């Protein structure tokens, strides 16, 4: 029972690391094309270390969790420039790299160097929790310790790489989150969850996240074929991605006059002759802790807005596709391009 994935069986720490970082919080089917594109464009850690930040962020577009992309660059630079292109060959050394946690360090140590470290990803938590009937929550420090200990105990130390790959594949293909294949499962006779018929209740999580709703009104302001954009600074998940001037409101504007009452609108557009051309349909994106609903208001300006000059750049409308935007802005731009092609 195995999944045919392009990085599987590789002993190259660069390929293993790249695949593991790309696949954190991402399904294998979604991450695979990114892995292939990255490896083609950056066949070595040196190539990645020398890439521009904008290019890497652009290639990452659509994967989300952009902190991973920023750590990807940092680690590539540490390995290429401070370690002569050599990844650390111990679990402890790997843990020192930016963005490499216990799971990724165990995966690289076992797959590249066959070191006896058990990986503990969502698949492994689920298999162990069900097979041993463990009700300890997997998202508490105590629960994590219990599962780490158990994972280490059951690890096949003679062939850790093979064992780690097998248990992850087993979780992904047989002991799946919904509708596990218990009837055909080779472990069924010894599985506690099956004996008690509690597969759907395991593993246990201590808390379910309550997601916050946020409402963004992006102003796509165009002046002589150029549009205002800025690179986000700060440390949130969209840091270093680009965006249009933004008005956030506690609810989605029911009409244009709702947005026009906002102090930012008055500040930016109060003295500037302009024409409102269109308001898009709402676009939605779900993140770990929040749902974002965005609308895009297209505005033609008769002159530049001096107030925006310090934070925003005016860029050619045609060049917008070269910038890395959050997924929902990318969706709006794609839909707009399609719409224009259809006209
Ligand atoms: S019997 Fe069902 S729940 Fe138990 S390990 Fe097999 S697939 Fe998972």
Image (cartoon, helix red, strand yellow):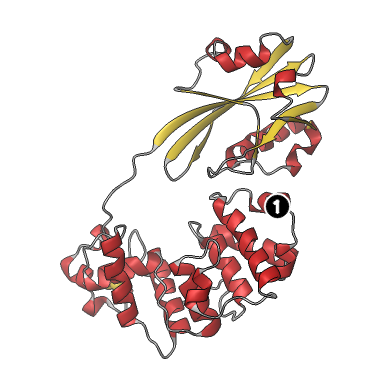
Ligand 1 located in image quadrant: bottom left
State the residue position of label 1: 53
* Residue depicted at 78% across the width and 32% down the height: 315
Give the percent coordinates (x, y) of residue 1. 44, 77
Give the percent coordinates (x, y) of residue 45. 69, 69
* Residue depicted at 60% across the width and 48% down the height: 62
Please indicate, yes or no, whether residue 257 appears anywhere in the rendered image. yes
* Residue depicted at 52% across the width and 75% down the height: 93
User: Mark 1 falls on what kind of element?
Assistant: helix
Q: Residue extending furthest left?
A: 196
Horizontal placement of 135 versus 60: left or right?
Answer: left
Q: Residue extending furthest right?
A: 224
Crowd band around label 1 with a 10 angstrom C-alpha radius: few (<14), some (14–19), many (20+): some
Please indicate, yes or no, whether residue 1 appears anywhere in the rendered image. no
Give the percent coordinates (x, y) of residue 211. 38, 38
* Residue depicted at 42% across the width and 82% down the height: 163
Give the percent coordinates (x, y) of residue 6. 60, 72
């Amino acid at each position: 029972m195995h999944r045919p994935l392009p990085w599987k069986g590789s002993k190259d720490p660069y390929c293993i690391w790249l695949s593991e970082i790309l696949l954190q919080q991402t399904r294998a089917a979604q991450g695979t094309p990114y892995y292939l594109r990255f490896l083609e464009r950056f066949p070595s850690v040196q190539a990645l270390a020398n890439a521009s930040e904008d290019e890497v962020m652009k290639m990452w577009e659509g994967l989300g969790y952009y902190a991973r992309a920023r750590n990807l660059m940092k680690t590539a630079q540490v390995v290429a420039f401070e370690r002569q292109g050599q990844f650390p060959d111990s679990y402890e050394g790997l843990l020192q790299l930016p963005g490499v946690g216990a799971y990724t360090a165990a995966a690289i140590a076992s797959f590249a160097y066959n070191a006896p470290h058990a990986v503990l990803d969502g698949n492994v938590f689920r298999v162990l929790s069900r097979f041993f009937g463990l009700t300890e929550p997997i998202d508490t420090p105590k629960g994590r310790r219990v599962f780490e200990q158990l994972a280490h105990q059951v690890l096949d130390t003679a062939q850790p790489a093979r064992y780690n790959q097998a248990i992850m594949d087993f979780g992904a293909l047989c002991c799946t989150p919904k509708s596990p294949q218990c009837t055909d499962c080779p472990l069924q006779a010894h599985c506690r969850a099956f004996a008690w018929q509690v597969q759907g209740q395991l593993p246990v999580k201590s808390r379910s996240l309550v997601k916050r709703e946020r409402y963004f009104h992006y102003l796509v302001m165009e002046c002589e074929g150029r549009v205002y954009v800025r690179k986000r600074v700060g440390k949130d998940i969209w840091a270093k991605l680009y965006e249009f001037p933004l008005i956030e409101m506690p609810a989605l504007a029911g009409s244009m006059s709702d947005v026009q009452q906002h102090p930012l609108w008055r500040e930016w557009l109060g003295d500037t002759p302009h024409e409102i051309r269109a308001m898009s349909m709402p676009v939605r994106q779900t993140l770990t802790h929040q749902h974002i609903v965005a609308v895009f208001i297209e505005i033609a300006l008769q002159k530049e807005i001096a107030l925006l000059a310090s934070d925003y750049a005016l860029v050619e409308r045609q060049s917008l596709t070269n910038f890395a935007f959050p997924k929902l802005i990318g969706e709006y731009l794609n839909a707009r391009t399609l719409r224009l092609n259809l006209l």
